[in-house]
Image (spheres, rainbow, N blue to C red):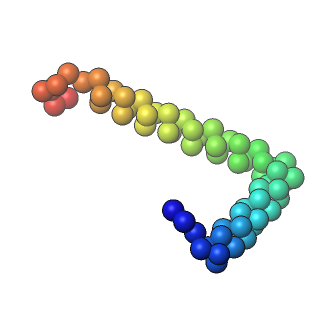
Amino acid sequence: MKMNKEEKKWRAEDDARTLARAQEIASDAKRMRAAETQAKQMASKVIQEAKNLQAVTRRPKGKKK
């Protein structure tokens, strides 16, 4: 997808704000620990969802359960 000049500028500005927020979080130990804990929980959920999807692909054809 090609971006015009305004879209590129907006994206660069948004990226700069994102990086600034990441720096704020990284420099605050309490926020960083909370974010790491939440990331672990989120990853566990995604892993479980992936396992469930893999289980669906292994079911014999013609079976409903």
Q: Which of 14 and 59 is in front in this view?
A: 14
Seen in the picture, residue 42 relative to 59 is either above or below; the reply is below
Residue lying furthest bottom in this view?
A: 6
Q: How many numbered marks are there?
A: 0
Query: Depth check: 44 or 1 in front?
Result: 1
Task: Name the side, left or right, on which 29 lies relative to 44.
Answer: right
| Residue 4 makes an appearance in the image | yes
Left/right placement of residue 25 relative to residue 48 reads: right
Q: Which residue is drawn at 30% across and 28% down?
A: 57
Residue 21 appears in view: no
**Which residue sits at x=72%, y=47%?**
34
Residue 8, percent across and down?
65, 70
Say which quadrant the C terminus sits in: top left
Give residue 49's position: percent from left, percent from top.
43, 37
Q: Is residue 41 left or right of residue 25?
A: left
- Tell me what residue is drawn at x 64 percent, y 78 percent: 6
The residue at the far right in this view is 27
Residue 55 rendering spot, x and y as whole percentages: 33, 27
Image location of residue 4, percent across then percent down? 59, 74
Residue occupying the far left of the picture? 62
In the picture, measured across the screen, residue 16 lies left or right of residue 54, that is: right
